[in-house]
Amino acid sequence: MSNGKETGAFFMGVLLGGFAGAVTTLLLAPQSGEETRDQIRRRSIELRDKAEAMLDDARERAESVVEDIKQRADDLQKQGRVVLKEGQKQLSQAVEETRKAAASASSSES
């Protein structure tokens, strides 16, 4: 779980750093305030769109991982059932063989 938090924090840092750099660059650029505000607005829209795309990608990856884990858990559960049934079968056979041996031993003693 901490890996997901670290990844989220990393992306947030990238976005904030990119935004801060863009604003700084625009503020230091020799142009009018109107042009600067327009550039800031366009750049923030671009950054928002990139952030949404990254979030969607991360969500798709997480869903894929969750689905893979569910499938593996189902497979392990099925394998466990097969092993349990085989163990029960072997135990039943061992009990039956023991009964037969005990019955044979008691009848030969008589």
Image (spheres, helix red, strand yellow):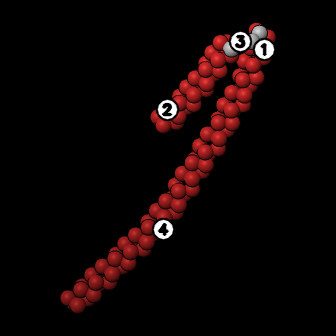
Q: Which residue matches tag 3?
A: 30
Between 23 and 89, the one lying in front of the other is 23
Name the secondary structure under disc 2. Answer: helix
Depicted 16 relative to depicted 31: above or below:
below
> Pointers 1 and 4 in contact (CB under 8 A)?
no
Q: Which residue matches tag 1?
A: 35
Name the secondary structure under disc 1. Answer: helix
Apparent side of residue 57 relative to residue 3 in the rendered image (left or right) = right
> Pointers 3 and 2 in contact (CB under 8 A)?
no
Please identify the quadrant where the C terminus is shown.
Answer: bottom left
Residue drawn at point x = 72 percent, y = 18 percent: 40
Depicted 99 relative to depicted 9: above or below:
below
Nearer mark to the viewer, of 3 and 2? 3
Residue 69 rendering spot, x and y as whole percentages: 54, 51
Q: What is the three-letter code of the residue carrying label 2?
A: Glu
Q: Which residue matches tag 2?
A: 6
Q: What is the three-letter code of the residue carrying label 3?
A: Pro
Residue drawn at point x = 64 percent, y = 17 percent: 25
